[in-house]
Image: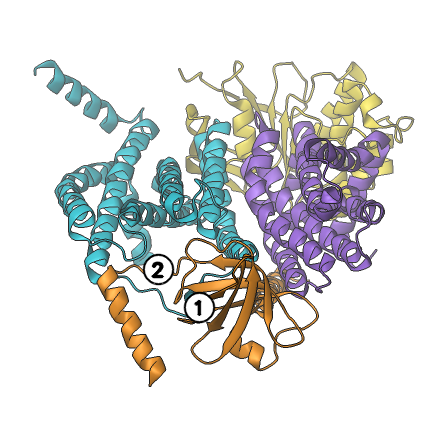
Chain colours: A purple, B yellow, C orange, D cyan
Amino acid sequence: MTLFPRAVNETTSRELRKTFRSPSEIFYPLIFFVLVLTMFPFSIPPVPGLFNSIASGILWTAALLAISLSLETLFKADYSSGALEVIHLSGANLVLVAIGKSLGHWIISGLPIALLAFPIGWALDLNFLTLWVLVITLMLGSATMSLTGSSISALTVGLRGGGFLLVMLSLPFFVPLLIFGSSAATNASLGIVPEAELYFLGGMFVLSLTVAPWATAHAIKIRLG
Amino acid sequence: MSKPILEVTNISLSRAQKLVVRDLSFSVSGGEILRLSGSNGSGKTTILRALAGLILPDNGKVARLEEKLGNITTSSNSVIYIAHRHGLEENLSPLENLNFLSQVCTPPPIRDGVSVLETLGLKTSMHVPTARLSAGQKQRISLARLLMFDAPLWLLDEPFTALDTSSKKQLESMIDAHLDRKGAVVLATHQRFNCKSHVLKHSLPMIP
Amino acid sequence: MSPRKKKMLTLALAIAGLGLATALILTAFEKNLMYFYSPSEIAEGKAPDNRPFRIGGMVVKGSVIREKDTLGVWFNLTDYAHERMVYYKGILPDLFREGQGIVAKGGLNETGLFVATEVLAKHDENYMPPEVADALKKSQEYQNSK
Amino acid sequence: MMMMMNLLHKYASLKNFYFLSVKLSRWLVLPFVFTLVYGLIGALWIAPQDYQQGESFRIMYVHVPSAWLSMFVYMNMFGAAILTLIWRVKLSEIVLRACAPLGAIFTFLALITGSIWGKPMWGTWWVWDARLTSELLLLFIYFGIIALFQAIEDRRMAAKACALMTVVGAVNIPIIHYSVQWWSTLHQGPTVSKIGTPSIHLDMLIPLIVMSVAFTLYFIIMCLARIRIGIREYDKNSTWVKNLVTSTLQKEHNQ
């Protein structure tokens, strides 16, 4: 993968190698995603077809929750071990490190969740267009969440109640993604190709790719300061 | 005498709104070692973090001069700061940690990870996940950066804790070699250590 | 790469990123307006015929005809340029009356009648005393009847 | 640029600003009381009934100013955040900390009055109306910033962290506004204002403007008071704060 700058490659592979060393940790976001999904049938009235009609919204909400809760582990270990300080002081380009971290986090949480949504959606007999729209919007949306989330995770790393603070601070950022993600899927189930929603999610991804790494680098300097 | 590598002019530092250091000034030139001593909480770590550029002093100035060091060409990275924490990723092996650092940092290192770990006597545990190593071994690995990168200024925060006698001697010889090459060292420690060149002393008053 | 060139590159990337992001988001919102059509746009055949869309307009005075026993109601919607007949079977919102702006969701049948599945009366954001509102209506009728 | 910098330093020195704000607050109290009373009279008596909603629209005279304030306060915080991040101005850190709770209060007030106003029109206390939902999300952003302030002990780091949060949040607010706007058109259809432009009668408009001015003056007075507290706390071991405190104690003592 030499298309990314070396620092991004190295950080991502470090992130993945670190997580694969403790194998159970790889599946935490995925397990949480399925867990949240199974809660819904217990809570909504057993009207036939109701669960299927709101399935795309539930899938998106479960993905959002799974990703925002897995954001905390992004910088936690590096901050407490002092590795973040060493990386910063050895003159590494924090913006590229931030992109590497977000990419690593996305490969562990956003990507598998988006891919898993395909079989789950199929099992809930969503039509073909909806399945594809779901996978694409979840991929784009989760990438944006990993990027924006890494800035907030860097800002709240090591704080008392950091986990709660992280979710509370990042939800307002994820709501627009949830709105357009689920509306894209619902429109697709009506047979409408949701161009508007896909454009929006693409725009949000590019925006977060431009702003978030700079903000993460700044957040790290603030937290280490 | 060569220009001072580090010049501190009446800085004052505070930690969580409490004034820790007031109007501190000193300068360290090539070949000099400064020992900061003072009771716990007198701000030794805060000062070292300010010297490393992590914290901005409330007022006053910290000036670090980049300078050619003898025959070794130095790069723009002018400081190595060894903190209490070892700064290693627990799941990865020492070698993976050092290789990552050498890939990511902007001034390229002057020695590769393997040879550095060998000189530090960690040849056998090079590929073992760091979590399984002892505190002393982790401390020795965190010293690896002193050999890997070349920087005129070393900032060492209690480097001798958890080191056995042989590693302590090795660190002392590393410090001597660095001073011979006209490098500068600022050291915060309670333990006695012997060092060839003259040790400047600076004891820090406790601010009520 | 010299530091100066690196700074230029990051600046260029940032501007390109922000530009692309705004362009994408703006096209998204511009594309969204497609889902909502006025009677004139329907007359020009812009509205899709195979799937549901939304129509908005003012209820034409005197065009509301209620079926005797069922809840069905016929009325015309206008945007002061074209009119479209709408049929809706269901409970109308309480703010629904002639001259009121409404939005209906539904589709066109083969005769061009808009069969609504949902009717929403939106408060039309105008704040004025009753006598001024009546005066306004009279002037509008005068304009329509001219 | 240099002129602006030393102007900034002259006024941004905490001591000067402290006494400047005391004078300013004294000047503002009278206009505030006057605009509030005049606004209330205008809103409750002079403004005629609304042709559609009758009397219930009068809640607008609290809802609209507080909604405007919830945004106005965030704009102030954004300015303070920029000053904190780029020039590390100590005063702007204190301003940022002072504004956050006030912003939350006005947003909460806008939410409450919004749902009270919606009751007669929509028949329920809460409707997922675009404006109310954006206000709700703005409230969450304010709560997030306040929680972040409290989570970090070191005041200066907390201010920098919240400044970054405010700047990044500011990018998010228009996005939330438009996406919620879009989302509510799916639920309720776009406001028909696309056809008739909204107009408001003069007798109703004047009290609205006066009330907005009154609310803004109230915010400025409260914000200056909170800033003074922040300054006293920030410079607590400086001499001028010590004699200030001793002199006030003296005054109370011999009263």
Q: Amino acid at mark 2?
A: Met
Which quarter of the rendering shows the N terminus of chain D?
A: bottom left
Horizontal and vertical percent position of residue B18: 42, 23
The residue positioned 58% from the left and 54% from the top of the image is A211
The quadrant where residue A159 appears: top right
Residue underneath mark 1 = C59
Horizontal and vertical percent position of residue C52: 65, 65
Can I make out residue A48 in this image? Answer: yes
The residue positioned 52% from the left and 13% from the top of the image is B39
Dot 2: chain letter: D
Q: Is residue D223 left or right of residue A157?
A: left
Identify whether B75 is placed above or below A37.
Answer: below
Residue A71's disc number: none
Q: Nearer the viewer, residue A200 or B102?
A: A200
Q: Nearer the viewer, residue B8 or A78?
A: A78
Outermost residue toward the left?
D255
Can I make out residue C12 in this image? Answer: no
Disc 1/disc 2 C-alpha distance (Å):
59 Å
Dot 1: chain letter: C
Circle count: 2
Number of other residues with Cα within 10 Å of mark 2, as a class: few under 14, some 14 to 19, many 20 or more: few
Identify whether A177 is placed above or below A199.
Answer: above
Which quarter of the rendering shows the C terminus of chain D?
A: top left
Whether marks 1 and 2 lie on the same chain: no
SS category of the residue bearing label 1: strand
Residue underneath mark 2 = D1
Q: Amino acid at mark 1?
A: Val
Q: Nearer the viewer, residue D198 or D98?
A: D198
Horizontal and vertical percent position of residue D162: 47, 39
Outermost residue toward the bottom?
C146
The residue positioned 76% from the left and 19% from the top of the image is B135
